[in-house]
Image: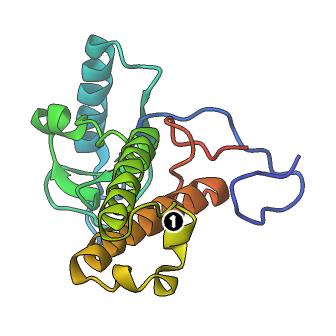
Amino acid sequence: MAARVGVDYREGVVPSPLHPRLHLFVCTNRRDTADPLGEGCGERGEVVYAALKRAVAERGEVRETWVSRTHCLGVCPRRGATVARSPALDGVAVLSEVDASDADALLRAPQAAPDWSAIEETLAKQEKLEAERVLELARRLHPGLTAEDIRNPHDFPALEDTDWHYADGVLTGIQSAANSLRAMRRGGASKPGTDDGEPEP
Ligand code: FES
């Protein structure tokens, strides 16, 4: 089965259903002490790895927070170890000179995904309220107008009113934002999809 993640993977690559909330990769790479790049994170990394595993177990988060050993991450600090995190937090994906006392900070949760359904619902409410206001203002200027009529305001000279056009412009802005959000959700362009971040079918 081909992967359904918007990437053109080779046929036969199978996407895993597992989605850890956080995956930390701790460098435990060892080199010879005479190596010009240094001896590697080695034992210092093992200490960080053990501290993270312990902290995750104490929190009861072993299913959603994964901690793995890895080889060199290309930073090679002289003290502490290098740790990569996925997803990044505050734009930081790799940290170096980490020691065991940093475990709690490393386990900080990424920000919750935006609640796209709530945002769409709020926009829909605003759109409805603003549409009612625009129609009500139009009827003050020209009694009897319908929602259909005001789609063609140039047919009604009474609507040549700055304040009415301002209100109508606000409505257009809200509609435009709501339409963009709906289109994004349909296409999964920025992964708003469902509340758990998965694109809608
Ligand atoms: S040896 Fe740890 S980052 Fe290179």
**Would you place residue 73 above or below residue 173 in this image?**
above
Q: Residue at x 59, y 42 (%)?
A: 198
Query: Residue 100: which quarter of the image?
Result: top left
Give residue 36's position: percent from left, percent from top.
Answer: 28, 74
Q: Quadrant of the C terminus?
A: top right
Give residue 56's position: percent from left, percent from top.
Answer: 31, 21
Give residue 46's position: percent from left, percent from top.
Answer: 30, 36
Q: Residue at x 28, y 74 (%)?
A: 164
Q: Residue at x 89, y 46 (%)?
A: 1
Q: Nearer the viewer, residue 56 or 185?
A: 185
Left or right for 141, reference 152: left
Type of residue at label 1? Ser
Does the rendering let one see residue 25? Answer: no
Q: Residue at x 42, y 35 (%)?
A: 21
Q: Nearer the viewer, residue 134 or 186?
A: 134
Residue placed under numbered mark 1 in the picture: 180
Q: Nearer the viewer, residue 72 or 137?
A: 137
Query: Residue 96: which quarter of the image?
Result: bottom left
Ligand 1 is within 8 Å of the C-beta of the residue at disc 1: no
Give residue 130's position: percent from left, percent from top.
Answer: 34, 56
Element type at mark 1: helix
Residue extending farthest to the front is: 143
**Would you place residue 30 above or below residue 201 in this image?**
below
Q: Nearer the viewer, residue 183 or 33?
A: 183
> Could you tell me how many numbered marks the image carries?
1
Q: Residues within 10 Å of mark 1 (few under 14, many from 20)?
A: few
